[in-house]
Amino acid sequence: EESFHGQGGTKDTKKKMLQEYFRRIDNSINSNLKKRGLPLLVFGVDYLHPIYRKISSYPMMLGKGIVGSPDKLSLYELHHSALNEAQKYFDSDSEIPRAYA
């Protein structure tokens, strides 16, 4: 667990807000996907991946995810990237982690 010293600052505040935002996303993902046993593929800018992964409790996350800015890609490009990444995972010998009861 991280500790912050001093008065805190804008960077600390933004990080805490981002962590809380990701916790809310993770709660929603767990509520909606976990009970159906669906895999999750994370797509986002590089520095956000480790923050989300540290917070996430979702047991069926696929691979390392896709790094990039979804805002700069068309819907087709997003879909194509997701299919390619999922296909790599399903073509490998890896098993999808099973959701815990």
Image (spheres, rainbow, N blue to C red):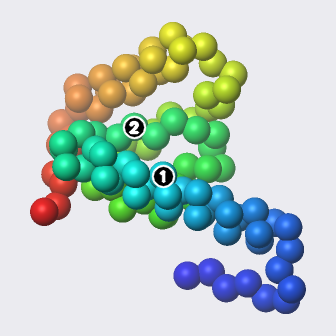
Inter-mark Cα distance, 1 to 2: 14 Å
Contact, mark 1 vs mark 2 (Cβ under 8 Å): no
Q: Nearer the viewer, residue 21 or 63?
A: 21
Q: Crowding at label 2, few (<14), some or many (≥20) Cα neighbours within 10 Å?
A: some
Residue beneath label 1, please?
25
Relative side of 1 to 14, left or right: left
Q: Secondary structure at mark 2?
A: loop
Q: Is residue 53 visible?
A: no
The type of residue carrying mark 1 is: Ile
Work out whether 42 lies above or below 24.
above
Q: Quadrant of residue 2?
A: bottom right
* Horizontal and vertical percent position of residue 89: 29, 32
Q: Nearer the viewer, mark 1 or mark 2?
A: 1
Q: Earlier in the sequence, mark 1 or mark 2?
A: 1
Residue at far top of view: 76
Identify the image quadrant of residue 73. Answer: top right
* Direction from residue 12 to residue 29 in the image, left or right: left
Residue 42 image position (x, y, % from top left): 46, 40
Q: Is residue 56 above or below residue 34?
A: below
Task: Look at 32% across and 53% down and name the residue there.
Answer: 30
Residue at point 18% right, 54% down?
99
Q: Is residue 10 visible?
A: yes
- The location of residue 83, given as percent across then percent down, is 37, 20
Tell me the number on the disc at residue 35.
Answer: none
Q: Secondary structure at mark 1?
A: helix
For residue 41, which numbered disc appears in the image?
A: 2
Query: From what the image shows, is residue 83 above or below residue 93?
Result: above
